[in-house]
Amino acid sequence: MLSVWVIRNFLLIGDEDSCWDSTPRLSTGEEGSVPQTRQSILRNRLLRAMAPDDFERLQPHLDPIALQLREVVIAPDAPVDELFFLETGMVSISTAHDERRIEVGLIGREGLVGAVPVALDCTTTPHVFFVQLSGEGLSIGRDAFCAAIAESPALRRLLLRYVHTLIVQITQTAYAHASLSLEGRLARWLLMCHDRSDSDELVLTHEFLSMMLGVQRAGVTLAIQNLEGAGRIRAKRRRIEVLDRGKLLALTNGSYGTPEAEYARLIEGA
Amino acid sequence: MPLYFFHLRHGPDPNGLAQDLEGDELAGPEAARDHALAVARDLIARVRLHAVRDWFSCTFEVTDEGGHLVMTVPFSDTVTEEDED
């Protein structure tokens, strides 16, 4: 069971962005048999990238789960007993201070929530991991996952390479915070969100972006207006449509693209 | 509590107003003004935007739920009020 916390100061839209209904079912078992998850129908890029025999090691332990908006999947300083391969939706890694919660990392269908503390053999993490776009995924118990990586050097290597790409992403977030204007940071965030979404239209409120980017809502509204004026996005109430990725990329000053390229190179062999 | 909308005026033309469609619930006009000043201070101190050359030329145009202008809060008021303290 996942613990559900309602995050303070976290105002968001309702259930209209749920990816639950539009997603192909994960289980494809015959009627009357134990449902099995097939590697080929999955969307999680780590599960797809791993060798078939490594997937077979994990497969009996994978449980389909729904990820509800605002749900905390890993709480700060609490034991990480489960990991989550995301199929749809997004999980945010944020600083866990009460005053100002700022997103430092983003995990979508390319990722595994809980990979860092488990790969680095730490029981807990000081950060909070919560669902910022509802969706679904596959959970696996820590013990089963650790047993599989102890058996398979290839699986361990894949995990460590993923951890590397996440560290690169967080490093680039630090660079973006330090060097970019708010328009540039927003552009980077929209590109990352777009990469992990099935639609060009992203469902988000300004209040939500305000929290993600760690700035007052009025600043976000102004930045959105500026991006819209240049034809990069189209903003509607509670929605932002990505119109021109190239124009967004031009604002990011190199802060977008490095972790994405590392992922493609190290995980998918591009 | 009443809902207040904090539209950000950053230029003279119609495009110079960033519309707040979400609003904040606050106890009354005094709380709304305090909120506007707190937001302005935080923007001045922490946020760099291409769209804004000078935060001190910006103003919050605060409206109620009916869209009526309740008050304007120039960002320069953040300085005046602090000096009076």
Image (tube, coloured by chain):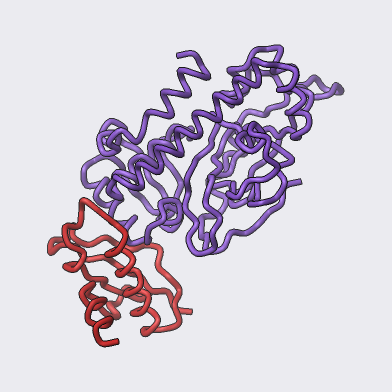
Residue B40 appears left or right of A148: left
- Residue A45: give x, y in percent of width and height: 56, 24
Colour in which chain B is shown?
red
State which quadrant residue A42 falls in.
top right
Q: Give the image location of residue A95, x and y in percent.
A: 52, 52
Pick whichever, A191 or A261, lies toward us: A261
Identify the residue shown where x is 47% and y is 53%: A102
Quadrant position of residue A174: top left
Q: Could you tell me which quadrant the C terminus of chain A lies in? A: top left
Quadrant assignment, res A251: top left
Q: Position of residue A80 (x, y in %)?
A: 70, 42
Hue of chain A? purple
The residue positioned 16% from the left and 57% from the top of the image is B53
| x 59%, y 46%: residue | A129
Report how many numbered discs are placed on residues in the image: 0
Taking A128 as reference, is A106 left or right? left
Q: Is residue A18 above or below residue B45?
A: above
Image point (71%, 16%), residue name: A152
Decide which of A50, A143 is in the foreground and name it: A143
Q: Residue at the bottom extreme?
A: B84
